[in-house]
Image (cartoon, rainbow, N blue to C red):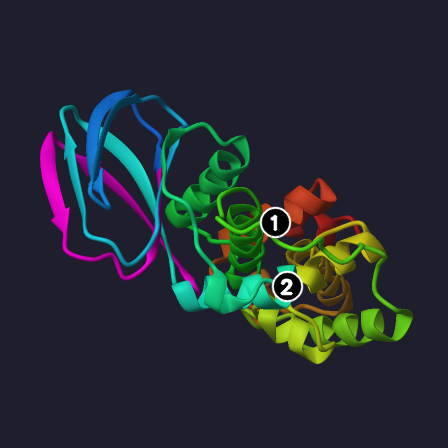
Amino acid sequence: MGIVAQQYHHRPNSLISPQLQQHLVTLNFGSPYTLTQQFNGRTQQARVVKGNTIITPAGQATEWHWQNNVNVLHLRLEPTFVNTVAERVLGIDPNHVELVHRFNVPDPMIEQLGRALLMELLSEHPSGRLYVDSLTNVLVAHLLKHHSAAPPVQEQPTLGLPPYKLQQAIDYIQNHLETDITLADIAVQVGMSPYYFARQFKQSTGIAPHQYHTQQRIERAKALLSQGDESIADISFRLGFTHQSHFTTQFRKLTGTTPSAFRRSL
């Protein structure tokens, strides 16, 4: 998957890491707190306000000391995954990928993506791997473009998918509505990187791949509700929803009514 998201609630404390194995993005989602960080021989201290970001690249010894209760989100990114996005999407030599250490900086895009990942982490009914993949690819591309030592080459223009590739992607999604597919699963069908495929797919259809996948699940559900007496619970299970309540929520979101009410209206 390339990313691990974890929320932490800590009392004042210290943490020493001999060497980070992953790139670490830390977001403050609680009250302001005073943080001292020692990284690569340098010590910095600041009052970290809500929404601000700390980016700590992998491979260096790090120490943290905080003086208040904290509520933070840690996003750990595998260097191999970041290198893959750099090479396949932005044309950066993976041997030269170098994220820059940032300390207590505002970045609205990282904050927005972090909040979306946190909501997914806390949700009783997660949207699935396809949605998380989309968020993660956008996050990594943003980090490489705005928090990297080497500026990337210009991205390929977003012109949309050729009709035959769009149909290949649609056919794959239609044949895997009941599966928790990933962005990479679809992208490999059309010979593209996940990030570039997602951008082109949205340009062609007006919606992201994970939105199309959910939309088509609901369309299939409407057909099943119309065709017979199969229970709503069975339809929910057949289409890969984790719980019937999750199915009902998504159905109402896209149709304005519940599965039961939809069936009664037929």
Foreground mark, 2 or 1, reads 2
- Can you name the residue that lies furthest to the right here? 163
| Residue 109 marker | none
Task: Please name the residue shown 72% across and 69% down the image.
Answer: 228
Q: Position of residue 171 (x, y in %)?
A: 77, 76
Q: In this rendered view, identify the residue nearer to me: 19 or 126.
A: 19
Relative vertical location of residue 35 with respect to residue 201 in this rendering, above or below: above
Q: What secondary structure is the stretch in magenta mostly built from?
A: strand
In the image, is 128 to the left or to the right of 6?
A: right
Q: Which residues are magenta?
A: 1-26
User: What secondary structure is marked by label 2?
Assistant: loop
Amino acid tagged 1: Gln
Camera-nearest residue between 253 and 211? 211
Q: Earlier in the sequence, mark 2 or mark 1?
A: 2
Location of the N terminus by quadrant is bottom left
**Image height of 162 relative to 66, above or below:** below
The residue to which callout 2 is attached is 91
Is 46 located above or below residue 99 in the figure? Answer: above
Disc 1: which residue: 250
Quarter holding the C terminus is bottom right
* Total residue callouts: 2
- The stretch drawn in magenta includes residue 175: no
Residue 157 seen = yes
Residue 226 rendering spot, x and y as whole percentages: 77, 63
Q: Position of residue 193 (x, y in %)?
A: 65, 69
Name the residue: 76% across, 54% down. Answer: 202
Q: Quadrant of residue 157?
A: bottom right
